[in-house]
Image (tube, grey):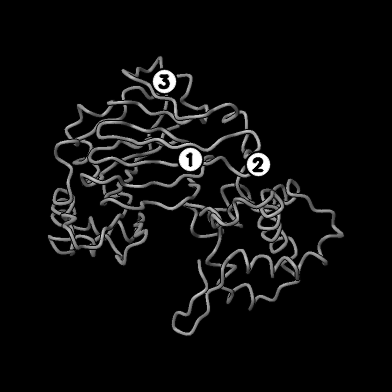
């Protein structure tokens, strides 16, 4: 985030903050002979890969460092990740008050998540120059990609779903307002993602004006997402869509649905998810462009690319291993639904 004043609290650029912290800690920890690999190993040995997400309390995503750092030499990534490890391994050098009060340490957690995640096997993206597009996809044609880490676009695989004709802002508004406890369940059991909007709950989204909900000219564009944990809502949603027919027969799907909706403009910013399993997302309305970047350790052998997903398409990405952002293209409102599979 940029440096700004908010209620007289100064919020520092995270990279600047990290470099300052690094300068303070490096002289104390250098003697331990730490390397990037040993830092990651120490974090995983201490709290485990899954425990890292719980420890950070916000396990769903790891934001990408500011774009201004991505063009720098690899040493900048070492600085970012190194500070995270040094803060963790040398935490006895930092006062408890500092760890609790520092906005840099707690709010900008990408560096902690970066060091705690499993190291990516770069073979999954070596030589991959674009998203693999499959037409008339079947279980057999998808099998080679199911767990490979390679992004796949299944063209038109959801066109026959009733959801492409029934899901809308008003559909979700009516659904969540009519089922007792449905809105509360998003707050209490699931997650709501406001992205760049001022909405704080799904309920507040459904209170917006009709003009704004319809994306009328002059209204501020919006894009939000949420997960559903309410079984009554889930049953109704699944009356309108089905598990993608081409997923492996032995795979199990998550009980949680992820829904994303909004008008033209930036969707999600670059991030890694922390959900442990690959996922699929069906585009039920509108068009959305995904940009994919390899993780830092694979940047020297793997490429970045993008793909535009159109109504009726299903995109399958291991979002634990590909940094990704989304952009809603002009036209219809973008509505997509997805889940994980193993």
Q: Mark on residue 297?
A: 2
**Residue 75 appears left or right of 218:** right
Quarter placement of the C terminus = top left
**Residue 59 appears left or right of 136:** right
Residue that label 3 marks: 142
Which structural element holds mark 3? helix
Rounded to the nearest angstrom, the CA distance separating label 3 from label 1 is 20 Å
Residue depicted at 19% across the width and 55% down the height: 215
Q: Residues within 10 Å of mark 2 (few under 14, many from 20)?
A: some
Which circle, 3 or 1, is nearer the viewer? Answer: 1
* Closer to the camera in the image, 220 or 336: 220
Which circle, 3 or 2, is nearer the viewer? Answer: 2
Residue 300 location, x and y as percent? 66, 37
Residue that label 1 marks: 292
Rounded to the nearest angstrom, the CA distance separating label 3 from label 2 is 27 Å
Residue depicted at 82% across the width and 67% down the height: 28
> Of callouts 2 and 1, which one flags the residue occurring earlier in the amino acid sequence?
1
Residue 241 location, x and y as percent? 23, 33
**Residue 125 appears left or right of 37:** left
Residue depicted at 44% across the width and 83% down the height: 7
């Amino acid at each position: 985030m940029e440096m700004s004043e908010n209620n007289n609290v100064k919020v520092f650029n995270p990279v600047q903050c990290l470099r300052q912290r690094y300068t303070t800690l490096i002289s104390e920890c250098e003697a331990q002979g730490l390397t990037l690999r040993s830092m990651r190993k120490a974090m995983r040995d201490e709290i485990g890969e899954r425990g890292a997400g719980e420890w950070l309390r916000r396990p769903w995503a790891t934001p990408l460092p500011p774009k201004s750092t991505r063009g720098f030499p690899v040493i900048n990534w070492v600085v970012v990740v190194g500070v995270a490890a040094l803060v963790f391994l040398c935490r006895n050098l930092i006062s408890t008050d500092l760890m609790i009060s520092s906005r840099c340490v707690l709010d900008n957690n990408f560096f902690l998540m970066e060091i705690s995640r499993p190291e990516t096997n770069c073979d999954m993206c070596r030589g991959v120059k674009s998203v693999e597009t499959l037409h008339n996809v079947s279980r057999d044609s998808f099998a080679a990609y199911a767990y490979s880490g390679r992004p796949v676009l299944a063209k038109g695989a959801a066109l026959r779903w009733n959801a492409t004709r029934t899901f809308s802002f008003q559909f979700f508004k009516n659904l969540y307002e009519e089922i007792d406890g449905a809105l509360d369940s998003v707050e209490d059991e699931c997650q709501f993602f406001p992205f760049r909007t001022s909405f704080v709950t799904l309920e507040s989204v459904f209170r917006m004006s009709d003009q704004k909900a319809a994306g009328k000219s002059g209204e501020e564009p919006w894009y939000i997402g949420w997960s559903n944990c309410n079984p009554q809502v889930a049953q109704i949603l699944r009356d309108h869509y089905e598990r993608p027919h081409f997923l492996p027969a032995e795979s199990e799907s998550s009980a949680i649905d992820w829904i994303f909706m909004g008008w033209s403009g930036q969707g999600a910013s670059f991030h890694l998810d922390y959900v442990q399993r690959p996922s699929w997302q069906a585009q039920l309305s509108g068009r959305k462009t995904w940009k994919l970047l390899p993780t830092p350790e694979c940047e020297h052998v793997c490429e970045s690319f993008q793909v535009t997903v159109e109504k009726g398409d299903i995109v399958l990405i291991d979002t634990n291993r590909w940094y990704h952002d989304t952009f809603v293209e002009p036209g219809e409102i973008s509505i997509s639904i997805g889940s994980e599979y193993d």
